[in-house]
Image (cartoon, helix red, strand yellow):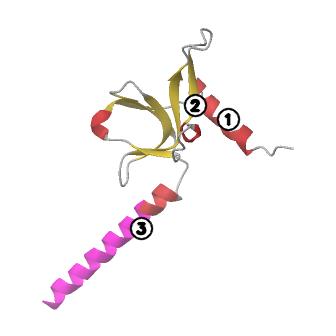
């Protein structure tokens, strides 16, 4: 009985350490890459992918159609700039995902997001 208690306590400690490491990895860890997620609604979102505890994107951008502008039919907009004031994180039901792909660092969307971030971070005078 005493040996079983030791094994149980050891297992609980290991699970707590693993859980703590996963939380740290998701919140503080490394710089997450940007992904494109295409949903069965026809919407495309771009953001930093997180799988734990649920499928989500943060620093979210979305593709929008500009029907009035024939020259720039598509544009990318920041999700939290929408008129209804959402937070900059969305949780997505994985059943609604048609495909997802990691964005290349030399791609146009990634470049646009990076340039927008750096212009937002630059102090204005």
Q: Is any atom of residue 105 visible in this view?
A: no
Q: Quadrant of the N terminus?
A: bottom left
- Residue 7 occupies which quadrant of the picture? bottom left
> Which label number is shown at residue 70?
none
**Gap between marks 3 and 1 measured at Cα:** 33 Å
Q: Which residue is mark 3?
A: 20
Region rendered in magenta = 1-22
Q: Which residue is mark 1?
A: 116
- Residue 57 colored in magenta in the image: no
Where residue 65 sits: x, y (%)?
Answer: 52, 19
Residue at the far left: name it. Answer: 1
Please give the name of the residue rendered at 63% of the width and 29% of the height, measured from the top-left corner.
112
Q: Which residue is mark 2?
A: 77
Left or right: where 2 falls relative to 14: left
- Residue 14 colored in magenta in the image: yes
- Give the mark nearer the N terminus: 3 vs 1: 3
Q: Nearer the viewer, residue 78 or 113?
A: 78
- Give the mark nearer the N terminus: 3 vs 2: 3
Q: Nearer the viewer, residue 60 or 27?
A: 60
Against 68, residue 41 (above or below) is below
Q: Main secondary structure of the magenta part?
A: helix
Left or right: where 120 falls relative to 101: right
- Give the mark nearer the N terminus: 1 vs 2: 2
Q: Quadrant of the C terminus?
A: top right
Q: Nearer the viewer, residue 105 or 52?
A: 52
Q: Nearer the viewer, residue 62 or 18?
A: 62
Where residue 106 sits: x, y (%)?
Answer: 60, 27
Circle 1 SS class: helix
Q: Is any atom of residue 15 visible in this view?
A: yes
- Residue 108 occupies which quadrant of the picture? top right
Circle 2 SS class: strand
**Gap between marks 3 and 2 measured at Cα:** 34 Å
């Amino acid at each position: 009985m005493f040996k079983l208690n030791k094994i149980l306590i050891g297992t609980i400690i290991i699970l707590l350490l693993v859980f703590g490491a996963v939380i740290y990895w998701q919140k503080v860890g490394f710089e997450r890459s940007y992904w494109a997620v295409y949903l069965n609604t026809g919407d495309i979102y771009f953001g930093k992918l997180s799988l734990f505890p649920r499928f989500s994107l943060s620093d979210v951008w979305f593709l929008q159609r500009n029907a009035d502008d024939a020259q720039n039919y598509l544009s990318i907009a920041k999700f939290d700039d929408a008129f209804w004031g959402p937070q900059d994180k969305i949780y997505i039901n994985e059943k609604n995902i048609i495909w997802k792909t990691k964005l290349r660092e030399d791609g146009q969307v990634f470049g646009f997001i990076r340039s927008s971030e750096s212009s937002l971070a630059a102090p204005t005078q």
